[in-house]
Image: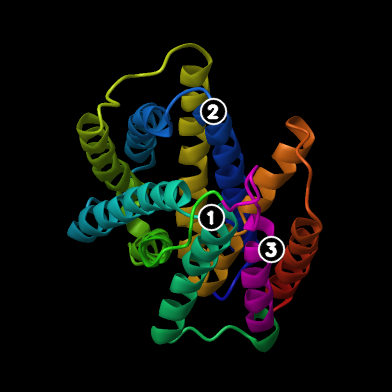
Amino acid sequence: MIGSPAAQGLALASATSFGVSDFVGGVASRRVAALRVVLVSTPVSMVLLGVLAVLGGGRITAGAVVLGMLGGISQALGIWWFYAALGAGPISVVSPLAAVVDASVPVCIGRVMGERPGMIAGVGITLALGAVVLISWHAGEDGGTRAGLTRGVVWLTIASGVALGMNFVFLDRTSADAGLWPLLFARAAATVLVIAVAAMTRNLRVPTGTPLRLALLIAVLDTAANITMLWALQLSLLSLASVLISLYPAATVVLAVVILRERVRPRQVAGMVLAAVAVAMITAG
């Protein structure tokens, strides 16, 4: 239960899927508003999870419904607030702050619930948190100074990290015999929220062409990421699985360098090396 090889593999698979999904989402959002992309990917992911939930079986319990919906709402709010913070504050501060809060919340709650990873794994968790910061810490095209770091931006960034971190916590508390039903209810709640926000902001329009195809790809990646995340949380300690999954920015950075030829910064290289060391320590611990 502390962290089997299967759980570690699932957590890293989830991180990879989330990272690739973020990269594809970033490419799509350069063509149309990000909310219009999510307006497609979230409902389609819900349908895919619904089909898989039916095929996989499992019991639909009150816990699966409530915890799943809470997880879906927290994840949707976290992403919304994160994008709002990026739009109002310096990217070079908002991104790493949100990332470290996202990774820290489940670790802290796991300790409150009595989780005690081994010493080596504990050091690995600390190194992984540092790796998340280094990998996600980047400056925008203007050096990340296009907006000031106001108190409102700080609190919005922290709130987004807490909300995203709580998604791990809610899904971790679901029962294994519920199958994939918690994920279906999570996506159903997120779909309602996304549609409501899109309507309020006059973005209730489905994209066409390449953005639509990318949004459909995101739905598949998101589905895979959430399924492997749920299984990893069920097979491992919350603090261990959530930290490994939070290394997802590494996949995004690698794809940006390989496909978009973006310049990787020395601190990001250091972060990926540190992440590799952290994974090895968590696996060994």
| Residues at circles 3 and 2 in contact by the CB criterion of under 8 Å | no
| Disc 3/disc 2 C-alpha distance (Å) | 24 Å
* Residue 82 x, y percent position in the rendering: 43, 52
Q: Is residue 9 left or right of residue 45?
A: right
Q: Is residue 152 above or below residue 260?
A: below
Magenta span:
122-145
* Residue 176 x, y percent position in the rendering: 38, 60
Q: Name the disc covering residue 90, or none.
A: 1
Based on the displayed image, in which of its 4 quarters is residue 199 positioned? top left
| Disc 3/disc 1 C-alpha distance (Å) | 16 Å
Residue in view at x 58 percent, y 53 percent: 145
Q: Which residue is mark 2?
A: 30
Residue 44 located within the stretch drawn in magenta: no
* Residue 272 x, y percent position in the rendering: 76, 59
* Residue 266 x, y percent position in the rendering: 81, 58
Q: Main secondary structure of the magenta part?
A: helix
276, 263: nearer the viewer: 263
| Disc 2/disc 1 C-alpha distance (Å) | 19 Å
Q: Which residue is mark 3?
A: 134
Residue 18 seen from this side = yes
Q: Secondary structure at mark 1?
A: loop
Residue in view at x 70 percent, y 83 percent: 120
Q: Secondary structure at mark 3?
A: helix
Inspect the image, locate mark 1, and give the three-letter code of the amino acid beneath it: Pro
Q: Residues within 10 Å of mark 1 (few under 14, many from 20)?
A: many
Residue in view at x 45 percent, y 80 percent: 108
Q: Secondary structure at mark 2?
A: loop
